[in-house]
Image (spheres, rainbow, N blue to C red):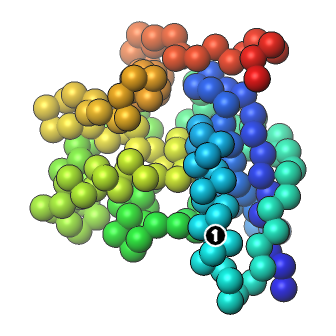
């Protein structure tokens, strides 16, 4: 039996996003949502390697207006709940536990890495929790941007443009003075 996973890309306020997803009778399941084409390709490679003796995986290019509209609605501040199901095709059991715990952080709220580790049942593993978030394959839907340092700083979050994305997302959700998004990919000539 062949399992079909769809691949799409679309432009947003925070840059070009890549998405791996599957559609079934009960809705859309997102497996990857990220900013890097290389990261998307790496997930596909890992999935195919992990499924050698199971179902075959076929990745097909297919647009999803539902995903694109909801993500852009969220980034415009019109949508607060990205109600997609998520499926982790990669990651260790620890990483998956941290990612699933991060999903429970409410819109507009932030918690510390230490609090996240405690909620996941690993109260002393806050650094490991931070490392797990660094590998989060489903940004926005698994809201790693809502996790900050205990002193209120944002933490490294990849630094540079990625840190500006985190600052933008937290400002968007808290309705504070929102800085401009770090990228302007709304122009047609950018690709």
What is the crowding at mark 1: few (fewer than 14 residues within 10 Å), some, or many (at least 20)?
some
* Image quadrant assignment for residue 26: bottom right
Q: Residue at x 68, y 89 (%)?
A: 53
Residue in the picture at 55% in, 50% down: 138
Q: Position of residue 110 (x, y in %)?
A: 31, 37
Write down the quadrant of residue 89 in the picture: bottom right
- Quadrant that contains the N terminus: bottom right
Residue farthest along the bottom direction in this orientation:
53
Compared with 39, 9 (above or below) is: above
Circle 1 — which element?
helix
**x%, y% of residue 126?**
19, 54
Q: Position of residue 98 (x, y in %)?
A: 35, 61
190 vs 130, left or right, is right
Q: Looking at the image, which residue is at 41% across and 71% down?
A: 92
Of the pair 26 and 47, the residue shown nearer to us: 47
Is 21 on the left or on the right of 13, as rendered?
right
State how many labels appear: 1
Q: Quadrant of the C terminus?
A: top right
Q: Which residue is mark 1?
A: 47
Residue 21: x %, y % from top left: 72, 57
Q: Is residue 27 left or right of residue 79?
A: right
Where is 154 relative to 140, above or below? above
Is any part of residue 81 visible from this angle? no
| Point 63% across, 69% down: residue | 47
Q: Is residue 184 visible?
A: yes
């Amino acid at each position: 039996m062949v399992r079909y996973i769809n691949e799409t890309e679309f432009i947003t306020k925070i840059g070009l996003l890549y998405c791996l997803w599957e559609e079934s009778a009960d809705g859309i399941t997102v497996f990857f949502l990220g900013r890097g084409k290389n990261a998307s390709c790496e997930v596909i490679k890992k999935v195919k390697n992990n499924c050698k003796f199971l179902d075959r995986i076929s990745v097909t290019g297919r647009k999803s207006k539902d995903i694109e509209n909801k993500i852009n609605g969220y980034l415009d501040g019109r949508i607060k709940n990205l109600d997609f199901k998520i499926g982790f095709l990669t990651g260790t059991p620890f990483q998956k536990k941290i990612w699933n715990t991060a999903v429970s952080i409410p819109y507009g709220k932030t918690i510390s890495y230490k609090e996240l580790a405690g909620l996941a049942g690993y109260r002393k593993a806050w650094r490991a929790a931070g490392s797990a978030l660094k590998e989060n394959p489903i940004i926005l839907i698994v809201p790693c941007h809502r996790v900050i340092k205990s002193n209120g700083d944002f933490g490294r979050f990849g630094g540079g443009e990625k840190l500006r994305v985190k600052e933008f997302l937290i400002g968007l959700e808290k309705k504070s003075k929102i800085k401009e998004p770090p990228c302007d990919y709304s122009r047609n000539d950018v690709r």
